Amino acid sequence: MRAMKEDPEDPFQEWSRPIPGQPEALMQGYASEELRDNAIRSFTARHHENEINLWLAALNLYAFAFEPHRVYSAGGPEPESPEDTEETQNQRRAYALRLQLLALAGRAIKLALDATLSGYYTEAWTLLRTMLDGWARCVYVRVRPGEYVRWYAPEEEDSESAGTEADKKPRQGPPHWGEIEVVIRKDGDDTDRALLEEALLRWELMQMGSHPSGEGIEQIRNDALGIMMYRPEYHEGFCMSAFSLGVFIQRVLLREVEFLGSHEELWLKTNAKVATDVRSLENSIRPALDEVAARIQARRAARRERQKPAIRHPESRSETAS
């Protein structure tokens, strides 16, 4: 592990974001944390230039796709025209929901990078897990457009579907991961299914990192020194995991953004290049993912064993013939 040393020539060493309106006496703790964050951020930036380059390339693609005044269209017939069938209405509404899910997931890209740079790995994994959840739900809606209604209460539906039998049914709520897995495996294409398997491994890995598990609490103790550390510290392994997880999640999100259409040729070419460039970093945590895969298989095997029906042998019967 690299030892972190402060760089006295770093122009951002003494920089701190102000919080307007707060008295200086209350800002002391915050300012101290900011200075600490900056020191770790600078150290991470100096030792992970390539990983940060890849992250920023994906962030730029996302930001361009959602720049102000950008117009997206689901296409299809004009609303309320004779050609506007229930299927086309579902497609249009599902398209709007996918756009919202992708926008919400993408907002965390910069925050997750900031957390990673400053050594907040548990917090970064939590943000990344939320982004991956957004991806999974977006794919679900893409392959099952009619399920868009699960995100909206009946009163939020517009007049086009008012009064239908579907409106009278209780709202189920958005699907959980188990439902999403089943639907993508059934209705998704080969790439969807392959990405789902990779996403499940990373979801499991982030579950361990974002919860107060053994992996997570490693960040706040130093066994060699016998101390507990409240402030974040740079950790090369955790940092590389966050970078690897981050570029994978951004790649799959950008694939869904591409499916929205209306992109310039340069954006499409750049997205294809970024998707290729990040593969090595994605696979850098393959040993950890393989361990997760083995853990999942063991759980499934144990579950199947528990579900086997009990077999009663004739000699075990206690009845006595009369």
Image: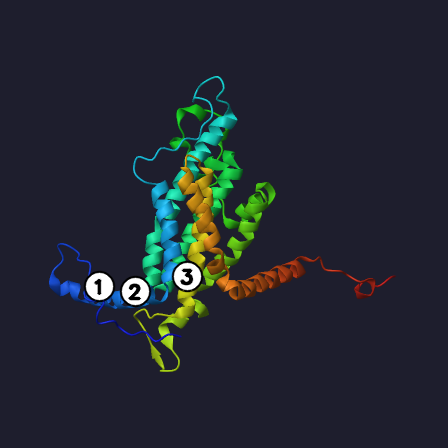
Query: Under tag 1, what secondary structure?
Result: loop
Q: CA distance from mark 1 to mark 2?
A: 10 Å
* Colouring style: rainbow
Label 3, secondary structure: give it.
helix
Q: Are marks 1 and 3 in contact (CB under 8 Å)?
A: no
Task: Give amino acid for label 1.
Answer: Phe
What amino acid type should be assigned to the residue bearing mark 2? Answer: Arg
Residue at far right of view: 322
Residue type at mark 3: give it: Ala
Local packing at callout 1 (Cα closer than 10 Å; few below 14, some 14-19, many 20+) is: some
Could you say where residue 147 lies in the image, as x and y percent from the top left?
Answer: 50, 36
- Residue in the foreground of this view, choosing between 287 and 99: 287
- Where 53 sits versus 170, above or below? below
Viewer-nearest residue: 67 or 280: 280
**Residue 272 x %, y %:** 46, 46
**Residue located beneath label 1 in the image:** 12
Q: Residue at x 40, y 42 (%)?
A: 267
Neighbours of disc 2 within 10 Å: few (<14), some (14-19), many (20+): many
Q: Do tag 1 and tag 2 residues touch (Cβ < 8 Å)?
A: yes
Q: Earlier in the sequence, mark 3 or mark 2?
A: 2
Q: Residues within 10 Å of mark 3 (few under 14, many from 20)?
A: many
Residue 41 numbered mark, or none: 2
194 or 225: nearer the viewer? 194
